[in-house]
Amino acid sequence: MRFHHILSVVLITLAVTVSAATVKDREGAVRGDKAKMENDPRWNWNDLDGGFRLAKTTGKPLLVVLRCLPCMSCAGIDASVLEEQELVPLLDQFVCVRIINANALDLSRFQFDYDLSFSAIMFNGDGTIYGRYGSWLHQKDPLNKTTTSFKKALEAALSVHQGYPSNKAQLSGKQGGPTPYQTPIEFPALAGKYQSKLDWNGKVVASCVHCHMVGDAFRAYYRSQNKPVPVEWIYPQPSIETLGITLATDDVAKVEAVVADSAAAKAGVQAGDSFVTLDQQPLVSIADVSWILHRSPDSGSLPAKILRGGKETPVTLGLPAGWRLSSDIGKRVGTWPMRAMAFGGMKMDDIPDDERATLGLDKNQMALRIFHVGEFGQHAAAKKEGFKKDDIIVQIGDDKQRLTESALIGDLLLHHLPGEKIPAIVLRGKERVELKLPQQ
């Protein structure tokens, strides 16, 4: 089976599935941004090399904003960053670069949450990363224009810049790691279909590599080699909520709530604390926290410093085995290709306790209701095997325990390979039906 075609099929499906989340005139949005921004006095438009050169010569830090224009998500904060006058004094302390496509990104430098449609990375002119910014609050609400968290990220990055280069050792964990290819368009899933530059004389949007396609290409790369997808690519840039912490969305890393008996509670973290460092790295935003977790081990511990009552206190967060599997990846765009790989193109939800009682299902057993079955390409594989909308999956292989859709995706992609067909049992009304779940 030719898995490098996964991406094109996924994009077709996504165009139908999430069309409401894109602007009506995608071509117009991209061309309009070029017309408005390419000669802007503050923003170096689509010119990374020029931005790095200017940062070196001026001694200013470099701010690179990555924005997917056809996507409506984050449109509010994007407009505020470009137009809000209160941001001007902060932005003037940076060399500002605006990037609207991922085609030629140097992946050794640009490693971030590819599922976000607005992200920012703050650099030194020599290429050293100071921090990352990205907001799921804005991703979920395109009308949200608040910039409080962005302002605090810029302020924190400026503070890191003031301490550079004496703090360079602390920043080592923020730097990107090795990648199979230097740029997105070298990945087999994208090679030959996209060029390094956009096609301004043709259909420009069709020539654009969107950020989420980079994450898709990573996963397709491993799958095409008949290898398990690494766990950090199944659950990329995880939220610290997996450890029992809710962070305030208007601050750098301030604890809003702690779940009782969680890893965070056991470490002594309390509501009102602020993380100063995590894994010895200074923080500029919640996205920095997710980056550190992305690079953390599957079990072990993370040292941290918290600010409480004006005093810095060391704490150690435990990472219980399998901690990533509690991540909720259901709303990530990058999860759709994984649904094709693990489920043959289905989307499902765990049935809540109150409904289980009416159906006679135990609270601890697997009970995942299918509410979408794909019909095209690799997203039609489950349909071809006989799965139907409203079927309830109660067993896959020997596994009958209760799992979320997110946890099941991880379990299947980590332990099964393309070409396998796993025995499955579904409830269809009062009937138990035996089927085969295809792995792709």
Image (tube, rainbow, N blue to C red):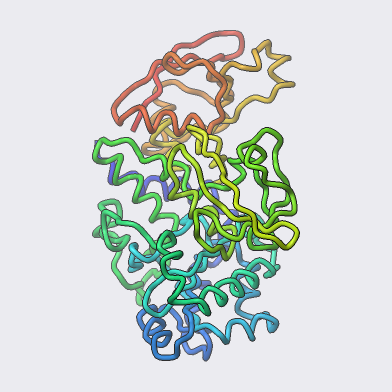
Pick the residue in front: 281 or 181: 281
Which quarter of the figure is the N terminus placed in? top left
Examine the image and state in which quarter residue 265 appears: top right
Which of the 4 quarters of the picture holds residue 178?
A: bottom left
Most distant residue in the top direction = 431
| Vertical order, 270 against 104 (above or below) | above
Tag count: 0
Instruction: Locate residue 303, reporting x and y percent.
Output: 53, 49
In this picture, residue 419 sits left or right of residue 97: left
Report x, y in % for residue 147: 67, 70
Q: Is residue 30 visible?
A: no
Res. 200 visible in picture: yes
Q: Residue at x 42, y 44 (%)?
A: 232
Q: Considering only vertical position in the picture, is 37 above or below 221?
A: below
Between 280 and 427, the one lying in front of the other is 280
Which residue: 61% across, 8% down? 430
Residue at 38 percent across and 74 percent down: it is 127
- Horizontal and vertical percent position of residue 228: 32, 35
Q: Please provide percent x and percent y for residue 129.
A: 44, 69
Judged left or right of residue 150, residue 176 is left
Image quarter where the C terminus lies is top left
